[in-house]
Amino acid sequence: MERIALLTSTLFYLFSFGHTLYALGAGRFRPGRFNFIAMALGAIMQGWYLSLRGAAEHACPIGNLSETLIFLSWSISLIYLVIGATYRLSLMGAFTAPLVLLLQIVALLLPNEVHASFFRPNPWVEAHAALSLVAFGAFGLAAVAGLMFLVQEGQLKSRRPAPIFHHLPPINILSEATLRLLWVGFLLLTLSFASGLLAHLAVAGGKFFFSIFIWLFYAAILFGSKFGVLSGKRFAWASSLAFLLALILLPVIEHLSGRS
C-alpha cells in the first residue's frame, strides 16, 4: 500500500505539471481548479504514505534520504495549498509541481533503507527533524515565488510579453510572499534548533556546521532585505539560490545524521 500511495501521489503531481505545460504550449492557459486539486490530491496521497511509514517505524518517517525528500516535498505542497489560496497565486502550482515532482522521483529512485539512529523515544528529536524539513519546505516555496518574480520582471521588460505574463501576480505580491515565506522558514528552523537543544541531541561537528551555515545564510538574506541591501531582483535571486544550496547540502546533513 505504501508504494501505491507514493506512486499515486507522483501521478497527481505529474498530471498537474503536464496539464500546465500543455496549456501554456497551446497558448490557452487559464488559472483554474485543476492544478490546485491535483496538487491537493498528491499531498493527500503523500500524507497517507507518510502515515503508513510512521506507523511501521513508530517514529517520524524520515529515517533515510528517500523519506526525507518525500517529507520535504509534502511540506512544500502543503504550504503551497495554504499560500496559493491566501495570496491567490493561481499560477504558483505550475512552478511548484515540477519541484515537488523532481524531489519525489529522486526519492523513488533512492534505496529505502532505514537508519536505526532515527528510532529514538524522544519527541524533541522528532520535532527537531520535522521542523527542519517543514522549514525547508517554506524555503522551497520562497524559491518558487522568487523565480516567479524573476519571470514576471523579465516579462515586464519585454516588448512582447508571453501569454503567461497576464496570469502572473504583480511583482510586489510575489516579493511580499517570498519575504513572508522566508521568515516562516527561518523561524521554524530556529525552533528546530531549540528542539534539538531541549532533546540534548548529540550533533556531529559537520552536521552542526552545515546546519548553522544554512541558518546564517537565510539570516543574512533577511537582514539584507530589512536594510535595503537586497531588494527586488537581487532578493529574488538570493532566495532561489539559497534553497538550491540547501538542497545540495541536505544529503550531506542526512548522511551525517545517520552517523551521529
Image (spheres, grey):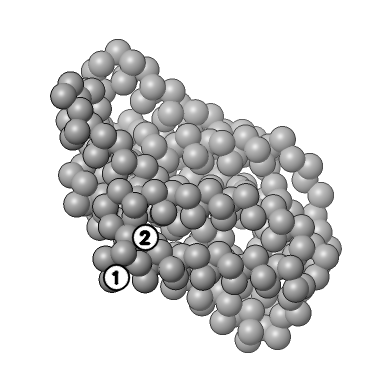
Residue 167 seen in render: no
On the image, which quarter does residue 161 sit in? top left
Q: Give the residue displayed 83% in from the left and 65% down from the top.
A: 259
Q: Amino acid at mark 1?
A: Lys
Callout 2 amino acid: Leu
Q: Quadrant of residue 4?
A: top right
Q: Is residue 134 left or right of residue 249?
A: left
Residue at image position (43%, 68%) is: 220
Please tell me which residue lies in front, 177 or 160: 160
State the image coordinates of residue 35 (x, y, percent, origin top left).
35, 33
Q: Residue furthest top?
A: 26
Q: Give how far apart the Cα atoms at labels 2 and 1 are.
A: 14 Å
Label 1 SS: helix
In the drawing, what numbered circle is on residue 163? Answer: none
Name the quadrant of the N terminus: top right
Query: Callout 2: few (<14), some (14-19), or many (20+) C-alpha neighbours within 10 Å?
Result: many
Above or below, 18 relative to 59: above
Q: Residue at x 76, y 79 (%)?
A: 202
Q: Residue at 40% of width from left, 64% of height from top?
A: 221
Using the image, determine if residue 20 lies above or below residue 188: above
Q: Nearer the viewer, residue 216 or 60?
A: 216
Mark number for residue 181? 2
User: Where residue 26 appears, x then y in whole percent?
Assistant: 30, 13
Q: Is residue 49 left or right of residue 92?
A: right
Place of residue 215 in the rendered image (x, y in percent of width and height, measured from the top left):
53, 69
Q: Which corner quadrant of the image does residue 227 belong to?
A: bottom left
Residue 160 seen in render: yes
- Frontmost of labels 2 and 1 is 1
Q: Which numbered disc, 2 or 1, marks the residue that appears first in the sequence?
A: 2
Question: How would you rate the neighbour count of disc 1 (Cα within 10 Å): few for under 14, some for 14-19, many for 20 or more?
Answer: few
Q: Helix, strand or loop at disc 2?
A: helix
Residue beneath disc 1: 226
